Amino acid sequence: MTDPAPKPSISDPGSEERALPRTQRSDPDQGYAFLLSMGRTGTQLISKLLAGNPDIAIYHEPYELDREIMQLRYSGFHTVADACMATRMDEMSQRSAGKSVHVESNSFLRFEVEWLQRELNARLVYMSRDPRTFLPSAYQRNVYTSADEQFTQVPHDGDPWVAEWGGFSRFEKICWFWNYANQFLFQALGPPVHIETATSSYAKFKEKILDPLALTLDQEIWEAKIAVKVNHSSRYHFRKRWRNRLGLEKSNLETIPPYAQWTDDMKAQLQRICGETMLTLGYEP
């Protein structure tokens, strides 16, 4: 695979001169664990399952400025992103004080692997989702539309797809988005946990999620929680309600069918952009 490590598109002139900020954790004995992924990959479901353990503090994308921190990191403002992450974790540690482990299931922190390991010595698990189910799910949001509030990433200079970006369809852009995020996480953390496998049984959940993060969860609690379907985040519902009230909700948002109903062109575009990464991550054609 090509190297997907974030490359600064905007220089950070102070990065050579400023010392990296250190966190001031309220409980130095508290452990840290993070499940990292891209969006629409089951992060909320995982947090709902882990919430069955009363001894840990579990959060799903809890910090209001996480999206902005992600964009700072992706754009190359590393010193600013470091400082923001230190402030963030100081605040989050206050929230989780008294719990043995601070756990987050968070797609916005996917570019913070190095920081989380360096500053918190955190346990990390990388989760992925098959792009053939990810793309129809992502299409239900405003991803790469004029109303896009989240996915503002475009290829850096040097990205193998940057020359074609201007001619990409929305479908191809979302393919690139899946490909880039998963290439980055794979190179940072190695093979992923497939969300489809991790939630298929308690034994797999224990093997793929609990044990690597040194967490526990009773099987009876897991079985009760897995039976409750998670549809949308509370943030999504809040925004949808207010968009409807203000007359801003689009009723004609483009969608795509399940993979079995894709056209040959769609399947070929997915293979062209994501095929190599899919094989690397263990997704068979």
Image (cartoon, rainbow, N blue to C red):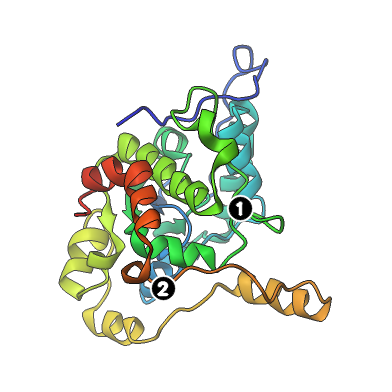
* Corner quadrant of residue 181: top left
Q: Residue furthest top?
A: 17
Q: Amino acid at mark 2?
A: Ala
Residue at 27% x, 60% y is: 209
**Observer able to see residue 191:** no
Q: Is residue 104 above or below residue 176?
A: below
Q: What residue is shown with label 2? A: 51
Residue at 44% x, 49% y is: 175
Q: Nearer the viewer, residue 252 or 58?
A: 252
Horizontal side, residue 199 vs residue 118: left or right:
left
Bin the neighbour count of mark 2 within 10 Å (Cα to Cα): few under 14, some 14-19, many 20 and up: some
Quadrant position of the N terminus in the picture: top left
Q: Nearer the viewer, residue 16 or 140?
A: 140
Q: Amino acid at mark 1?
A: Tyr
Quadrant position of the C terminus in the picture: bottom left
Secondary element at tag 1: loop
Q: Are marks 2 and 1 in contact (CB under 8 Å)?
A: no
Residue 219 spot, x, y in % from top left? 22, 79
Q: Nearer the viewer, residue 53 or 3?
A: 3
Residue 214 spot, x, y in % from top left? 26, 56
Q: Residue furthest front?
A: 264
Bin the neighbour count of mark 1 within 10 Å (Cα to Cα): few under 14, some 14-19, many 20 and up: many
Cα gap from disc 2 to disc 1, whole angstroms: 32 Å
* Corner quadrant of residue 55: bottom left
* Corner quadrant of residue 148: bottom right
Horizontal side, residue 279 vs residue 62: left or right:
left
Q: What residue is shown with label 1? A: 144
Residue 248 spot, x, y in % from top left? 79, 71
